[in-house]
Amino acid sequence: MAKRYEELSIEDDFMFGKVMEDKELCRDVLQCLLEEPVGELEDVRTQREFRYTSKGKPIRLDVYTRDQKRIYDAEMQRLNHQTPENLELPRRSRFYQSTMDTDHLSRGKSYRELPEGKVLFLCTFDPFGLGYAKYSFQNLCMEDRKLCLDDGTEKIFYNCIAEEIPEQLKYLYEYIRTGQVGDDLTQRIDEEVIRARKNEEWRSEYMKELLHDDDVRAEGRAEGEHSGKNKMILLISRMSSGGDADKVVQLADPEVLEVMQEKYGIK
């Protein structure tokens, strides 16, 4: 069930985006995460949606910004859709990086003009299950691990529930997990969260997003039900002409249904 607006915290992507609209605060959060200086941010765009073709998958970046030499995407990831067989986040990070590159390289420009890119996932779970406070990935040569592709990209996944946390990240992780303020940075974040909860325009925007998401899910269910009905009609038709009309009444049995679907090539 979706949270009420006044219940949103920094771990919710909508609130995370609104808080990070403050350029100075966004810059300081990035510096904390990267443990290195970040230049003055030129622009901070939140909940930025991209769709490059009518049939292409749209994506929405939580916090999308750049300084003089890098582009950044910071994502708050509260829900864990990963399984050992389906590590979704690595593929998503790849898609996000390619989207950022496409957005920044205009026709006629050289590939050398691509800025460095960093995709950051702040996870309220351990994304790879190894207990590290963060997992940093760059492209390396498999034959010689000392050779880096040096394509200017890095993907970092932050494990906010890690037990051993570097001093630089300790208070930020604690705030994301519990809302407990521990230093100046988390104090400023908390003040922005409180201010955002009082913003009626943002409250209205959040409610509209919830309604839109509900409509999308309803459309998906309706399409699924329609598709399912059409497949059942086709199956019954093929069974009737294929000598299995007597088994139509048994289709409520999952085993019979599976056998008939396999026999008549309908899934």
Image: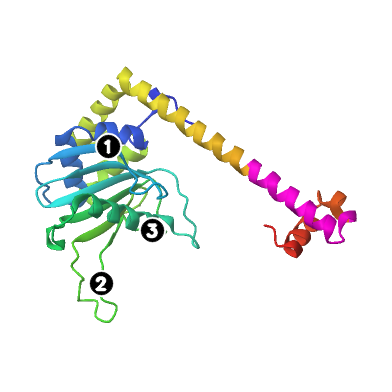
Q: What percent of the width, then of the height, locates residue 169?
A: 24, 47
Q: Earlier in the sequence, mark 1 or mark 2?
A: 1
Magenta stretch secondary structure, dominant? helix
Q: In the drawing, does residue 258 fall left or right of residue 206?
A: right
Q: Which residue is mark 1?
A: 46
* Residue 67 in view in this figure: yes
Question: Callout 1, which amino acid?
Answer: Thr
Other-residue count near label 3 (Cα within 10 Å), few / some / many at <14 / 14–19 / ≥20: few
Magenta-highlighted residues: 225-246
Q: What is the distance, in whole Å, between disc 1 and disc 2 at their CAs? A: 31 Å
Question: Callout 3, which amino acid?
Answer: Arg
Seen at 49% across and 57% down, the residue is: 83
The front one of 131 and 151 is: 151
Q: What is the distance, in whole Å, between disc 2 and disc 3 at their CAs? A: 17 Å
The front one of 10 and 211 is: 211
Residues at badges 2 and 3 in contact (C-beta under 8 Å)? no
Q: What percent of the width, then of the height, locates residue 121?
A: 32, 49
Residue 140 - label: 2
Other-residue count near label 1 (Cα within 10 Å), few / some / many at <14 / 14–19 / ≥20: many
- Regarding mark 2 in the picture, which secondary structure is present there? loop
Vertical order, 141 against 178 (above or below) = below
**Residue 241 drawn in magenta:** yes
Seen at 12% across and 58% down, the residue is: 113
**Residue 156 sits in which quadrant?**
bottom left
**Residue 239 drawn in magenta:** yes
Q: In the drawing, does residue 56 fall left or right of residue 22?
A: right
Residues at badges 3 and 1 in contact (C-beta under 8 Å)? no
Residues at badges 1 and 2 in contact (C-beta under 8 Å)? no
Residue 167 - label: none
Q: Which residue is mark 3?
A: 91
Q: Residue furthest bottom?
A: 143
